[in-house]
Amino acid sequence: MSLKTLTQTIGSGTGGSLRGAVSALLARLGFGPARAATPAHRTVAFTIAVTTLAAKMAKADGVALPVEAQTFERLFEIPAHEAKNVRRLYNLAARDVAGYEIYAGRIAKLLKGEPVFLSSVLACLYHIAAADGIIHPAEDRFLENVGTIFGLDRSEYLSIRASYVHDRQSPYAILGLAPNASDEELKARYRQLVREHHPDSVCASGVPHEFCVAANRRLAAVNAAYDAITREREGSRRSKETA
């Protein structure tokens, strides 16, 4: 389905309740299986689902801020001729958080079998949540539930979260490792994450810009976490040798 159809459909959804307007919009677009020729993350169904989910996440703390909407538009590179219509959908969805689980579920279905893409979507949502300088506990809970709906395992979710929410365990959480992991496990996990999230390999697969942004952020966090852990371990070993 073309972006022209998106323009026409959103343009007709004026008035009425939020749920009615969005439901009518989705009903007209349909959420059937994506055509084989079109990657799921490039379909109109994905665009609508991720726009709605991002808007509802921004509302989770009670106030959907303009900076969050602006960050969403920068991440997802909304074409100029579609910006007005996407904003209209975003603003409709940002009135409340009701039904966000449905949209998270649709994204999970559209990207089934593509866990790296699902991780990238969650990372993008965290990026938007952090746009105002703080991730509100309500946004954090919202995104934790989205991770569950996406089917991400706990270590993957915590790894993404730790890139934006910092605590004493964050270097290990970013790598998805326990603090008592061996040096061999540390190196193996680090190499795995670099392979999966290196921007060159992610962007070379033809994914949208926002996935490349998420990959850059994730790789930077992975490198910083690995460096922090190796420095700490080397310092600890030197201390033992000189004791």
Image: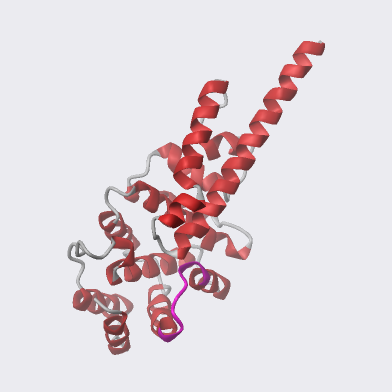
* Quadrant holding the N terminus: bottom left
Instruction: Return the x and y of residue 212 as percentages of the image width and height.
Output: 49, 58
Tally of numbered discs: 0
Judge from the rendering whether residue 44 lies leftward or rightward of residue 167; answer left or right.
Answer: left
Q: In the displayed structure, would residue 8 be above or below residue 78?
A: below
Residue under the image location 42 percent in, 50 percent down = 119
Q: Quadrant of residue 21?
A: bottom left
Instruction: Return the x and y of residue 223 as percentages of the image width and height.
Output: 60, 41
Q: Quadrant of residue 243?
A: top right
Query: Is most of the magenta stretch helix, strand or loop?
Result: helix
Residue range corresponding to the magenta coloring: 74-81
Structure colour scheme: secondary structure
Instruction: Return the x and y of residue 175 as percentages of the image width and height.
Output: 53, 36
Judge from the rendering whether residue 196 lies leftward or rightward of residue 71; answer left or right.
Answer: left
Instruction: Inspect the magenta stretch and tell me whether residue 77 lies in it.
Output: yes
Along the line of sight, the residue nearer the viewer: 132 or 208: 208
Along the line of sight, the residue nearer the viewer: 47 or 145: 47
